[in-house]
Image: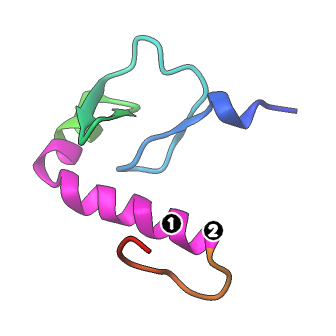
């Protein structure tokens, strides 16, 4: 079984990255994001807030059955 805690997801293309060492990365709002290529990193940097909101929406959908919650409770 794979260790989910050590897996990273490219926020642009959705590719799973098991070993982010040596991969392109960037930090946005105190969080490190890893990418499969420089192309994905560049795309993220152009629209970082949009990708971050999509990431938050996915997390909200996982934590709140049946709906996505926006904002801080």
* Residue 53 picture quarter: bottom left
Q: How is the image coloured?
A: rainbow
List x then y, in percent, for residue 32.
35, 31
In the image, farthest residue toward the front = 73
- Answer few, some or many: residues within 10 Å of disc 2's Cα (few below 14, many 20 plus, some between 14 and 19): few
- Above or below: residue 24 compared with residue 34: above
In the image, farthest residue toward the right = 1
Q: Say which mark, if any, is on residue 58.
A: 1
Q: Say which mark, if any, is on residue 62.
A: 2
- Residue range of the region highlighted in magenta in the rendering: 43-63
- Residue lying at 16% horizontally and 43% vertically, measured from the top left: 45
Q: Which quarter shows the N terminus?
A: top right
In the image, farthest residue toward the top = 22
- Residue lying at 52% horizontally and 70% vertically, measured from the top left: 60
Asked if residue 48 lies in the magenta stretch, the reply is yes
Asked if residue 52 lies in the magenta stretch, the reply is yes
List x then y, in percent, for residue 67.
56, 87
- Above or below: residue 9 compared with residue 57: above
In the image, farthest residue toward the bottom = 66
Between 6 and 44, the one lying in front of the other is: 6
Q: For the residues labelled 1 and 2, say whether their Cβ atoms are less than 8 Å apart.
A: yes
List x then y, in percent, for residue 58.
50, 66
CA separation in Å, label 1 and label 2: 6 Å
């Amino acid at each position: 079984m794979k260790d989910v805690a050590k897996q990273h997801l490219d926020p642009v293309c959705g590719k799973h990255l098991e070993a982010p060492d040596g991969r392109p990365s960037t930090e946005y709002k105190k969080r490190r994001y890893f990418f499969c290529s420089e192309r994905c990193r560049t795309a993220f940097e152009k629209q970082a807030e949009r990708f971050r909101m999509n990431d938050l929406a996915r997390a909200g959908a996982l934590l709140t059955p049946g709906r996505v919650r926006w904002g801080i409770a």
